[in-house]
Amino acid sequence: MKNSPQKSATASTPLPSLGFDPSEMMQGFTSKTGDISVFGGFSKNGWLDLQQHSMNFLSNRFKQDAELFNKLKSCSNTSEMTQACSDFYTGAAEDYQTQVAKLTTLG
C-alpha cells in the first residue's frame, strides 16, 4: 500500500531532517511573544535562560544514559554490571542535585 501525503489545511510541512534543535525551536517560539512571558511574569530572556539551561542539562544526561548502555554491553560479569550501574546512578543523583541548585539560583 502506497503512503500518500495528507491533504489538509492543517497538515504541517515535513521537516528536512529527523533531528531538531530544541534551542532553535524555543527561540522561534519566544520570538513571537512580547517582553513578558505568561509563565510567572519572568522576562522572556530570563525564561529562555532557564529553558536553555534545562535543555543543556537533559542533553548531557541523555548522553550519559547512552554511555551506560555502551559500558553494560562490554561487561563480562554481573559484578561489572552492578558497578557500572552504581556509578551511573551516583553520578546522576549528583547531577540532579546540582541542577536543582542552579535552577533555584537562576529562578
Image: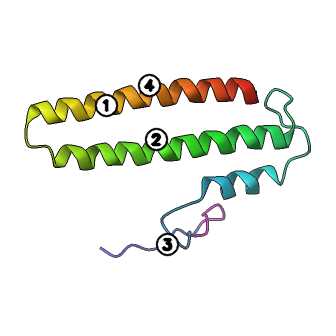
- Rounded to the nearest angstrom, the CA distance separating label 3 from label 1 is 47 Å
Is residue 92 shown in magenta? no
Residue 1 left/right relative to 4: left
The residue singled out by tag 2 in the image is: 61
Query: What kind of residue is marked 4?
Result: Ala
As displayed, is residue 77 above or below residue 60?
above
The residue mark sitting in front, 3 or 1, is: 1
- Rounded to the nearest angstrom, the CA distance separating label 4 from label 3 is 45 Å
Which residue lies at the image location 50% right of the left edge and 63% below the top edge?
A: 19
Q: Quadrant of the C terminus?
A: top right
Magenta residues (range): 8-14
The reply to whether callout 4 and callout 3 are in contact (CB within 8 Å) is no
Residue 62 left/right relative to 15: left
Q: Residues within 10 Å of mark 2 (few under 14, many from 20)?
A: some
Q: Quadrant of the N terminus?
A: bottom left
The residue mark sitting in front, 2 or 1, is: 1
Is residue 11 shown in magenta? yes
Query: What kind of residue is marked 1?
Result: Asp
The residue singled out by tag 1 in the image is: 87
Q: Residues within 10 Å of mark 4 (few under 14, many from 20)?
A: few
| Percent x, y of residue 3 | 39, 72
The residue singled out by tag 4 in the image is: 93
The residue mark sitting in front, 4 or 1, is: 1
Q: Foreground residue, 87 or 20?
A: 87
| Mark before the other along the chain sequence, 4 or 3 | 3
Query: What kind of residue is marked 3?
Result: Pro
The residue singled out by tag 3 in the image is: 5
Q: Secondary structure at mark 1?
A: helix
